[in-house]
Amino acid sequence: MNNSNNNICFFIDSLSNSGGTERVTTVIANGLASHNFIVTIVTIQKFEKSFFKLNKNISVMCLRDTENKMSLWERVTVILKLRKIIKEKKIDILISVDSLLSIYSLPASFSYNVKNICWEQFNFKIDLNRYLRKMARQLSGILSDRIVVLSEKDKTFWDNGLVFNRAGVSVVYNPSSYSITELAYCAESRKVLCVGRLTKQKGFDLILNAWKEINNRHPDWILTIVGNGEEKENLINRAKELHIVECTEFVAATSNIQDMYSKSSIFCLPSRFEGFGLVGIEALSFGLPIVAYNCDCGPSEFVSSNGVLVQNGDVEALAESLISIMSDTQVRISMSKNSKIAAEKFMLEKVIDNWLGLLQNIK
């Protein structure tokens, strides 16, 4: 392979979605491209346009022309097509974005002088009922050159859960997509913001349940939920059942969400589980106080004096925590200042430096 060791390939399921995995992949890929790495992104699913902006020097290739469920033969074809790309583009480092994809990337790079990085985007305890993900994680422990996780807590899960850990596990935080804002905190705003895919995992049903009580105490506040997903209709119907339609709004996912952050007063992360919670990191950059469930993994590593951690799944405690902060402007202002301080370690430059160090160490 290429002796310069600067030819990197990110292998991801799709770039068309608006989720945190897609966002952070494009951010890191752009950052490495700006440091003179040759960057290729290979997607499994049909690719038309990235939801997030990509550096013009990054090439994108897709392995399928549909998004249908794959047959066994199509899975084999993915491996063969990826192997061909690795050889033709002389890839030095192959980064699988999601441990599940190691099922394809490890055999695709077999016998080639390629360094494999398994970049986990969930956490070790979450397999989404897919046996293949469990198997892929164990294979990564044996055959990958490094496993990258998003939190110290998840590193502990991996270290304790791998049968063989030849690869070693490193923690590299996901970066905020935004610099720390210079705009003043909007203390007079009466908006609580939630952002994410509208799925069961994200817990938006829980914040709606909590909002019923919140609205009784603070009828002038609005809950804004930004995102797309299969739970949208169920969530809208739940808001109707709770008679909170007038104080809730659902906004489609947007690649230009800065305006939503800057005009909100509090950020809520009601997830049942996370890989890390990238939207929480973004909220820090805009100086938002954060109320989050203390789920595995992520929130406990960026929420302290800048917000409140709530027992996972406790709707009443979530409501009371939000009500407490909503009731005290000075508390929100103090938490806002602390959020900007907490955001510093998640700035892109620091995270890219961590990636550069990791890539150098595995060459």
Image (cartoon, helix red, strand yellow):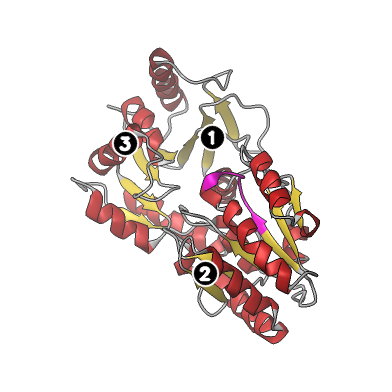
**Residue topped by disc 2:** 345
Residue drawn at point x = 57 percent, y = 64 percent: 347
Residue 164 visible in image: yes
Q: Earlier in the sequence, mark 1 or mark 3?
A: 1
Above or below for 59 versus 123: above
Q: Residues within 10 Å of mark 3 (few under 14, many from 20)?
A: many
- In the image, is 152 to the left or to the right of 15? left
Q: Which residue is mark 3?
A: 136
- Mark 1 nearby-residue class (10 Å; few <14, some 14–19, many ≥20): many
Dot 2, crowdedness within 10 Å: few (<14), some or many (≥20)? Answer: some
The residue at 24%/50% (across/down) is: 161
Where are the magenta residues, as a range? 194-200
Check residue 47 for magenta coloring. Answer: no
Q: Residue at x 22, y 40 (%)?
A: 142
Residue 197 on the magenta span:
yes
Amino acid bearing label 1: Ile
Q: Which mark is residue 41?
A: 1
The amino acid sitting under disc 2 is Lys
Q: Are marks 2 and 3 in contact (CB under 8 Å)?
A: no
Number of the front mark, 1 or 3: 3
Pinpoint residue 98: horizontal percent, then vertical percent: 43, 41
Residue 306 percent location from the top left of the image? 57, 77
* Helix, strand or loop status at disc 2: helix
Residue 335 located left or right of residue 252: left
Looking at the image, which residue sits at the far bottom?
Answer: 330
> Secondary structure under badge 3?
helix
